[in-house]
């Protein structure tokens, strides 16, 4: 493999027209440049320079190599500049996967903060429930993922998660439901009603909550769309359990909610072991800040 310092010396001679001028432009001594050029000729087996009077000029082989070397050195300089920009947080793009209610609540606040503290960084968002988000992390389609887990649910292999906040669960019933007019009721009071459930993780948690309350829910509808779920509840077609972030992102005026003694853990997930790129850490920091703000203001 050709030595980059020797290629740099050849390009400098081609640009300046002499070994001494090349040495001055690179801040080397003239013997150093002459040594690099001799070694480059020995490595390539080509005559790269011709003496002309008291100066030198490049041979056709030397000119061709100098042209390619200039391209290589230019690409290397560009790569170094891009890495510097990324590590100094003056530019860069971070891809974040987030479940819908997290994308609607945590991400906008994080984007606002990111624009203030690191205006050169861009955040690319893709909406994904935890299983899909984990797959994106494994495939390199996301750098970070805002995910959630219920008690007993664990991360896949090589996925590491840091808690952001505990997202309380709420019983959601029609606003004009006669049973909800008085004191707050529990799940067991709706054992005979139809139920509406969401994603697979949410469904398993709903089933577990109802089992602890002493009944098996009759599932009438299933939807991952928390807006649609609330509309179904408001229409009197069933009751459900929703996390606080979903209600924070959208609250239908036709529903009534009661907090339960249960929560899901909202977390920031990554793939593989640290260290992480500086831009990824910067985005993780603003997401954690947004989560702290939400946790401090649950309503």
Image: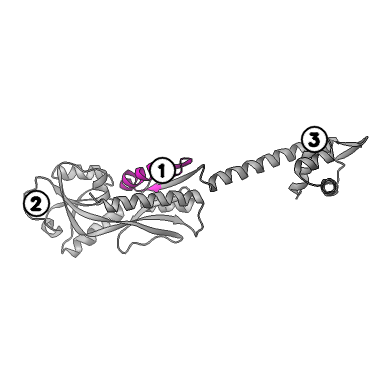
Q: Earlier in the sequence, mark 2 or mark 3?
A: 3
Q: Residues within 10 Å of mark 1 (few under 14, many from 20)?
A: some
Residue to which mark 1 is pinned:
125
| Left or right of 218 on screen, residue 2 | right
Q: Nearer the viewer, mark 3 or mark 1?
A: 3
Residue 177 position (above or below residue 206) = above
| Residue 294, image x, y percentages | 29, 50
SS at badge 2: helix
Q: Mark 3 and 1 residues: CB-CB less than 8 Å, in contact?
A: no
| Residue 24, image x, y percentages | 79, 41
Q: Is residue 105 visible?
A: yes
| Tag of residue 163 | none
Q: Which residues are magenta?
A: 97-126
Q: Earlier in the sequence, mark 2 or mark 1?
A: 1
Residue to which mark 3 is pinned:
16
As measured in the structure, the alpha-carbon distance from the residue carrying label 3 to the one carrying label 1 is 49 Å
| Residue 22, image x, y percentages | 80, 40
Residue 251 position (above or below residue 261) = above
Q: Residue at x 48, y 40 (%)?
A: 120
Q: Residues within 10 Å of mark 3 (few under 14, many from 20)?
A: some
Q: Mark 2 and 3 residues: CB-CB less than 8 Å, in contact?
A: no
Residue 209 position (above or below residue 223) = below
Q: Nearer the viewer, mark 2 or mark 3?
A: 3
Residue to which mark 2 is pinned:
180
Q: Quadrant of residue 184?
A: bottom left
């Amino acid at each position: 493999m050709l030595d980059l310092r020797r290629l740099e010396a050849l390009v400098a001679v081609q640009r300046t027209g002499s070994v001494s001028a090349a040495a001055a432009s690179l801040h080397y001594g003239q013997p150093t440049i002459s040594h690099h050029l001799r070694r480059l000729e020995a490595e390539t087996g080509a005559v790269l320079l011709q003496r002309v009077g008291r100066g030198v000029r490049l041979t056709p082989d030397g000119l061709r190599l100098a042209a390619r070397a200039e391209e290589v050195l230019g690409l290397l300089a560009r790569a170094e500049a891009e890495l510097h920009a990324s590590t100094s947080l003056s530019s860069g793009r971070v891809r974040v996967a987030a479940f819908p209610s997290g994308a609607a609540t945590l991400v906008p606040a994080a984007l606002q903060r990111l624009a203030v503290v690191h205006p050169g960084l861009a955040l690319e968002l893709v909406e994904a429930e935890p299983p899909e988000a984990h797959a994106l992390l494994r495939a390199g389609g996301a750098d970070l993922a805002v995910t959630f887990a219920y008690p007993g649910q664990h991360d896949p292999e090589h996925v590491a998660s840091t808690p952001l906040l505990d997202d309380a669960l709420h019983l959601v019933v029609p606003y004009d439901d006669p049973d909800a007019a008085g004191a707050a009721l529990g799940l067991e009071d709706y054992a005979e009603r139809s139920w509406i459930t969401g994603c697979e993780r949410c469904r398993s948690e709903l089933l577990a909550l109802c089992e602890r309350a002493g009944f098996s829910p009759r599932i009438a509808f299933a939807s991952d769309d928390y807006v649609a779920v609330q509309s179904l509840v408001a229409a009197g077609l069933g009751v459900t359990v929703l996390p606080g972030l979903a209600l924070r992102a959208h609250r239908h005026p036709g529903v009534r909610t009661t907090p339960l003694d249960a929560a899901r853990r909202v977390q920031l997930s990554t793939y593989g072991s640290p260290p992480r790129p500086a831009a990824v850490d910067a985005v993780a920091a603003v997401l954690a800040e947004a989560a702290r703000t939400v946790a401090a203001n649950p309503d």
